[in-house]
Image (tube, rainbow, N blue to C red):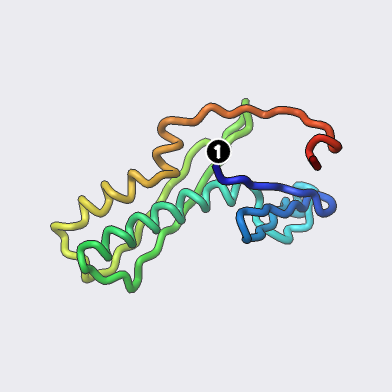
Amino acid sequence: MTAIRVTHLEGDQFELSVRQHRLRVDQPVSDGGEDSAPTPTELFVSSLAACVAHYARRFLARHDLPTDGLAVEADFTMATRPARVGEITIRLQVPDAVPVDKRAALLAMASHCTVHNTLEAPPAVSIDLVSTHSAAA
């Protein structure tokens, strides 16, 4: 199991520790933050876009197809009650040299990335309170 730790820095800023990597999150100024980093929600949507890109690149490499120009763009809208991401649109930009007869398979592969599969079959999530003393142990 991969352990991720999130620690408070100041205001709405937090540092995420994933293995040896460090990321930060914040909130926009309009929401009381300093806009020094993406929001957690933006990272959530970004993880989907990055996963789609990863699966697409692997497909192209496996079929000896070019990856120059491969890109993924994502847009999302929020919903309320409860507050959540209501809709995500992903656009997978493929290199022009990818043959038309390979594009449907590429799309199918990219549409079944790990993050997308997780959204389709959500995991059980539990949130437990622990004291600062027991969390440090």
Q: Secondary structure at mark 1?
A: strand
Residue 68, percent across and down? 33, 73
Q: Looking at the image, is 72 positioned above or below residue 39?
A: below
Q: Which residue is mark 1?
A: 85
Question: Which residue type carries mark 1?
Answer: Val
Q: Looking at the image, is 44 positioned above or below residue 95?
A: above
| Most foreground residue, 7 or 56 | 7
Question: Split into 4 quadrants, where in the image is the N terminus?
Answer: top right
| Most foreground residue, 27 or 67 | 67
Residue 44, percent across and down? 56, 46
Question: Split into 4 quadrants, where in the image is the C terminus?
Answer: top right
| Most foreground residue, 36 or 127 | 127
Residue under the image location 62 percent in, 60 percent down = 21
| Most foreground residue, 113 or 137 | 137
Q: Looking at the image, is 101 positioned above or below residue 122?
A: below
Residue under the image location 78 percent in, 38 percent down = 135
Q: Residue furthest bottom?
A: 68
Residue 52, percent across and down? 39, 53
Q: Looking at the image, is 96 positioned above or below residue 123?
A: below
Residue 22, percent across and down? 66, 60
Query: How many numbered circles does the render carry?
Result: 1
Question: Where is residue 115, by image quadrant?
Answer: top left
